[in-house]
Image: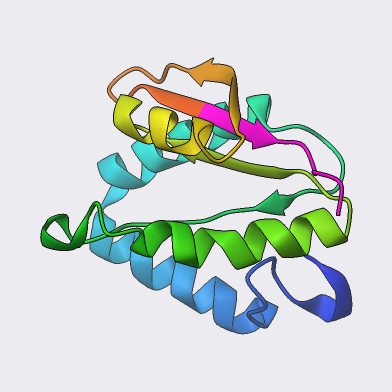
Amino acid sequence: SRGSAGRSRAGVPPAAAGELERSFRAAAGQQVWARLARYDEAVAAVRPRGPLWYLGVLATRPGYQGRGLAGRVLAPALAAADAQRLRCGLETSTQANCEYYRRHGFTVTAEVRVPGGPDTWWLQREPRPA
């Protein structure tokens, strides 16, 4: 989807975004592309409308897990969303991640089932008072 100033949500100019999409689609193949499209549609159906901070991929290499690194990356984003009085949202495909995000104030608001895809959960966190 397009944001302001003719840029995609990721801040990439539309022409470049289109070229990236074509390249990815060619590399992935039609079957994978179709499965990804079904996944995106299923997540979009449960994603709440209105403004929110969408939190993308957060991953920690297994040997570094349990040291608080992800929490240190997450904390400034949550603080900024709180300052703007915006909720945060994300999806995850692992139950362990649901538990991790619950400890940071998120709640599971929807389960997403996609045939041939991973079970996925949409989580949301309401802004906290400053």
Would you say residue 129 sits in the magenta stretch? Answer: yes
Magenta segment? 122-130
Q: Nearer the viewer, residue 124 or 12?
A: 124
In the displayed structure image, the side of residue 88 where residue 104 appears, left or right: left
Task: Let me know if residue 118 appears in the view.
Answer: no
Residue at 49% of width from left, 77% of height from top?
Answer: 19
Q: Quadrant of the C terminus?
A: bottom right
Please, is residue 85 above or below residue 69 in the view? above
The image position of residue 35, as x and y in percent, is 35, 35
In the displayed structure image, the side of residue 2 where residue 63 appears, left or right: left
Q: Quadrant of residue 113?
A: top left
Please identify the residue farthest to the left as the structure is shown.
63
The image position of residue 44, as x and y in percent, is 63, 34
Q: Nearer the viewer, residue 99 or 17?
A: 99
Would you say residue 28 sits in the magenta stretch? Answer: no
Q: Quadrant of residue 84?
A: bottom right
- Colour convention of the picture: rainbow
User: Total marks drawn?
Assistant: 0
Residue at 51% of width from left, 17% of height from top?
Answer: 111
Task: Let me know if residue 22 appears in the view.
Answer: yes
Q: Nearer the viewer, residue 98 or 32?
A: 98
Residue at 61% of width from left, 35% of height from top?
Answer: 105
Q: Quadrant of the N terminus?
A: bottom right
The image position of residue 97, as x and y in percent, is 37, 35
Residue at 77% of width from left, 44% of height from top?
Answer: 87
Please, is residue 11 above or below residue 29 in the view? below
Please, is residue 56 above or below residue 32 in the view? below
The image position of residue 118, as x and y in percent, is 31, 27
